[in-house]
Amino acid sequence: MSRPGFYFCFCPDANLIKMQIDRLLAGSGQDNWQLQTIWLDEQDQRQKIWSALNMPNMTGTPRAIILRHCESVEAAFWKDISPNLKGFKPKIWPFFCFESAWDKGKPKIPAPLKKTKYYKYADNKKWIWEYPGLNHQNIRRYVEQKCQDLGLSIPSTILGLLCENLPKDSAGIDNELEKIALLAHHDNTITKEHLRVISWQPDIDIFAFLKQVQSDGDIASAWNKIFSEKLKGQEMLYPFIGLLLRETRILWLLATGQGNKARIHPAYKNQKANLARKLGLEKISALWDMLLDADVGVKSGNVPSEQAMEKLTAGLFKLFSNRN
């Protein structure tokens, strides 16, 4: 056989997993791959999985089976699926995607999976791809490559500033760089002026802010995360409220046992769940009222934006401080 019979991907960035799968399919020697995605964190997928891994396409088109969120399945799954991976199926190629954050620099590989013969076989054949996702150490290399793909040149001083203002996920980076490419089409060179179009705001800053306030940590540092030079007055208030609303909804879902409905980057899920438990429903509920008061006050003209911002932030310290 000219390509793996099945394949394992361990990476918290779903877009990077997609890119890796695309590379493998392109180099497989077969064309016209049909992609079928199955979300393993959804219920009642057993029959769909069995059919996908055993029934070739009636038209003869090769099919790549993308099994998402493999980290969410129960231990018995890895034993039950073993018969479906016996023998090479030329028209079926399963990809098992593990999208949870790495722990201490290593992927979280379920113990029951590591014990299976097919996983040991895949490990021996190097049918496993591991990548920690984007971080401060490797984001520069990814951005440089993406700029090259877009035909953009970028001075090293601007590259460093750009990387500081981009999200640590590849899909977000791609979106921001494609916007910048439209602005830089005259000479295809990125300048500092082009960075103003970056719309991404790091939701982890809001999460870190709430966590820092709740733990009674470095208050000055928490203020600096919010009152940056990027946003002032009303320009700052509404992005801040928007991020807080999103974060509050996530905390509420986690606190009420509805974490499966919350869209959370795997790297922060456990941290946010812990914060939700510490805060409790009463404090999370009070935050809704604070956000509504700030929004109504400014839109009615009764409260200046700067005052509403100061009141809201001070209220957060009072609400989430351990002293209360």
Image (spheres, rainbow, N blue to C red):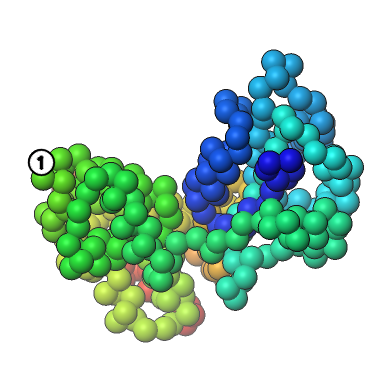
Report the side of 191 relative to 109 (left or right).
Answer: left
Above or below — where is 309 with respect to 238?
below
Locate the N terminus by quadrant: top right
Q: Position of residue 267 (x, y in %)?
A: 54, 63
Name the residue nearer the viewer: 234 or 280.
Answer: 234
* Residue designated by label 1: 186
Identify the image quadrant of residue 103: bottom right
**Residue at 56% in and 68% down:** 271
Query: In screen coordinates, is 215 left or right of 308?
Result: right
Q: How many marks?
A: 1
Label 1 sits on what residue type? His
Residue 306 visible in the shown view? no
- The image quarter containing residue 145 is bottom left
Task: Tell which of 98 and 6 is nearer to you.
Answer: 6
Residue at 13% across, 58% down: 192
Question: Is 314 situated left or right of 182 in this image?
Answer: right
Residue 179 can be seen in this image: yes
Q: Residue furthest top?
A: 59
Helix, strand or loop at disc 1? loop
In the image: residue 304, left or right of residue 321: left
Q: What residue is rendered at 18% in x and 68% in y? A: 157
Which residue occupies the foreground of this view, 174 or 272?
Answer: 174
Quick one: label 1, few (<14), some, or many (20+) residues within 10 Å? Answer: few
Residue 142 in percent (x, y) is at: 38, 58
Residue 202 locus on image (x, y percent): 36, 59
Q: Residue at x 80, y 56 (%)?
A: 121
**Looking at the picture, how far across and down is residue 285, in whole percent?**
49, 57
